[in-house]
Image (cartoon, rainbow, N blue to C red):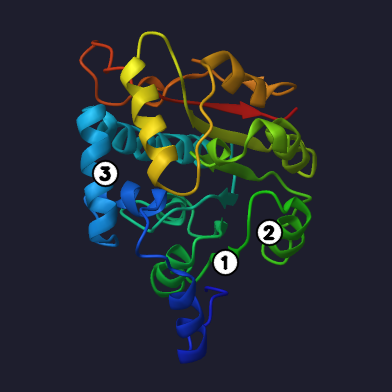
Amino acid sequence: MTENPPTTDGVADSLRERINTSQPHTARIWNYWLGGKDNYEVDRTAGDQIRQLHPGIGAYAQADRLFLGRAVRHLVQEAGIRQFLDIGTGLPTADNTHEVAQRLAPDARIVYVDNDPLVLAHARALLTSTPEGRTDYLDEDLRNVDAILEHAGRTLDFSKPVGLILLGVVIFIGDDEDPYGLVRRLVDALPAGSHLVLSHTITSPSMPDVDEAVKFWNEHGTPKLTQRTPEQVTRFFDGLELLEPGVVSCSRWRPEGRDGTEPEEVAMFGGVARKN
């Protein structure tokens, strides 16, 4: 079942009022790079300009999406996880968390969290569930940890392990907003056996064009991004058992169907860790 009621005319009007179509938005640009249709001309223009600055940027979106699938499959099949808290959901596309999880475990429960009104509008229409499982969607900001946990607790059982998914969302938390503390508060609320799945855009001397692309975005788009080094991304997993191969390019986290060659590195790094 799904906890999301059909969007009423009043709710739809309220959502439309919150959608700014005059400024590019990261969720819609990400959707564009993934080949989706839930974006506007301003997003496509910005996406193309960013791609000119950094031609490989579209591969990041694909790598992050495939990383999500591999991580969720691992958590369901190897770790026995049946509950997921996915914060920073983004616009629905192919193989969303609930689709991957419920394909393997129909009784899986998933709570999605995002604060983008366009994401919310589509989530209410598209996020369905198997009869055995449940999905819910929260219109909330990552910074509001207490509210997220309170509402997610209506669908998830926090006495049992949870897969906490934070893909490409902590980049929107500035260094002055205690990003490590926010992640730690979420992890602390989960029982032993839970897992953290996190990805983050990096900055590296070997990828100067990434810095140029982020600079362009922060001058023209919303919300603003904060890049971090691979070492700074690894800090989000402090106190947890980091699974092999550690924090690496998302394309290189347990790639499937390879012929022995290493996938191309992308500037989106990620990892999976267990809470003991």
In this rendering, position of residue 16 left or right of residue 57: right
Image coords of residue 19 (percent x, y): 43, 68
Point out the frontmost of discs 1 and 2.
1
Question: Viewer-proximal residue, 184 or 44?
Answer: 44
Q: Secondary structure at mark 1?
A: strand
Residue 3, compared with residue 264, is above or below; it is below
Per the image, the residue denoted by label 1 is 136
Tag 2 residue: 156
Q: Is residue 13 left or right of residue 181?
A: left
Name the N-terminal-most of marks 2 and 3: 3
Q: Quadrant of residue 163?
A: top right
Q: Amino acid at mark 3?
A: Gly
Residue 8 circle label: none
Quarter placement of the C terminus: top right
Label 3 sits on residue: 47
Residue under the point 31% across and 52% down = 31
Query: Vertical placement of 150 versus 206: above or below?
Result: below
Amino acid marked by disc 1: Asp
